[in-house]
Image (cartoon, rainbow, N blue to C red):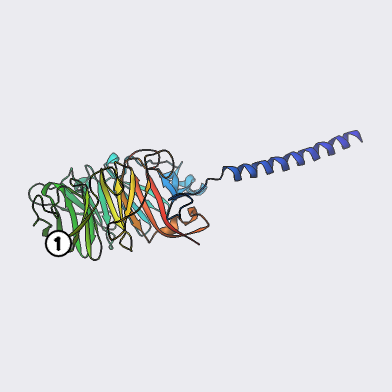
Amino acid sequence: MKIIRLFILILICGIFSFSCSAKISQKHKRDTKKESIFYPGAPDTAHIQYLTSISNSAFLGKRSKFSSFISGPQQVYNLSKPYGMSFRNGKLYICDPGIAGLEIIDFDRKRFTNFVPGGQGQFKSPLNCYVDKNDYLYVADPMRQDVVVFDSADNYVAKIKDTGVFKPTDVVVENDKIWITNPDNHCLNVYDKYSRKLISHFAQQYGVGDDGFLYSPFNVFVSDQKVYVTDFGDFKIKIYDLDGNYLSSVGSYGTGIGQFVRPKGISCDRESNLYVVDAGFENVQIFNKNAQLLMFFGGAYKGPGDMWLPAKVIVDYDNAKYFSKYVDPAYDIKYLVIVSNQYGPDKINIYAAVSAK
């Protein structure tokens, strides 16, 4: 009888202990839940939320036990020194000079691929890339001194060159044209998309001292009506019409609000707001179509949401579903803003433009 009573007492204590530990565990989970990171911070109205970052293939999650049984233990692949990016149809293409190739992240299939072709497609220092509506991949490689083209199956197709000095740093395919920045000849090379023949040297009509002269064109973004060029040598973003006529500029050299020290990647949203990476400030500044500064986000790396030598920014409306689970429940996501960092623990930062519900 004493043994039975002792057993019941032990059982009750065990149940009470488990219940207490479960409550403590749940409380611990609530206490350690990460708060959402917004820009600007409270009490101002939030416009940008930091969602998450990608630094290696582990971001895609673990494979099933069956896949691991068939293919062996899952290997983790790290991003080395990411620079340019292009996001289309659920695939994020990342130029990585650190591996002399690209990383391709397929979010639908949850695949992470190191794309390091040989032969005629071999890279030296892939800097920026673009995937067109036909899923053709264009990679600007200034050390190769050409742009390398691959088809939708990642097969080498062609290389785009120019006579004289040609060190392409960025490439965009829009309006059936291939737009390539070439700092060494102070202009953009524009090619026909289908024949890949040179059409023009964009903005070449301007001379030193002219507002439209490009001292060191490094990055390019093309919309339906305008061409935006990062002039690294003049610390400005210069804006032209599609025929190469200079319209206006954004920014100037300096450490003040709305100025630049090391402007690099650029992109625009559908309201013609301009996003500019500054590797010196380690942030992204946003300007409206009247060149007025709206806000900035990021900053020198101290933790999640910050940047470490950022290089590229892309605004994406088509792939938000892959990151919607990270959005604060009090907000709706409008589009993604993705920034690459060459150094630090967070190599690809994923942000979202948000609005309160």
Which residue is more in the foreground, 167 or 272? 272
Quarter of image, res 323: bottom left
Residue at 67 percent of width and 41 percent of height: 24
Horizontal and vertical percent position of residue 226: 22, 62
Q: Is residue 319 left or right of residue 279?
A: right
* Amino acid type, callout 1: Asn
Vertical position of residue 141 compared to residue 206: above or below: above
Q: Residue at x 81, y 36 (%)?
A: 10
Q: Position of residue 215 (x, y in %)?
A: 14, 48
Residue under label 1: 245
**Quick one: 297 or 320, which is closer to the camera?**
297
Q: Quadrant of residue 172?
A: bottom left
Provide the secondary structure element on which disc 1 rests: loop
Residue 101 visible, this orientation: yes
Q: Position of residue 99 (x, y in %)?
A: 29, 40
Query: In the rendering, at what x and y percent does residue 351 appear?
Result: 41, 52
State the residue at coordinates (39%, 47%): 349
Residue 107 seen from this side? no
User: Where the N terminus falls, by quadrant?
Assistant: top right
Q: Residues within 10 Å of mark 1 (few under 14, many from 20)?
A: some
Count of numbered tags: 1
Residue nearer the viewer, 279 or 135: 279
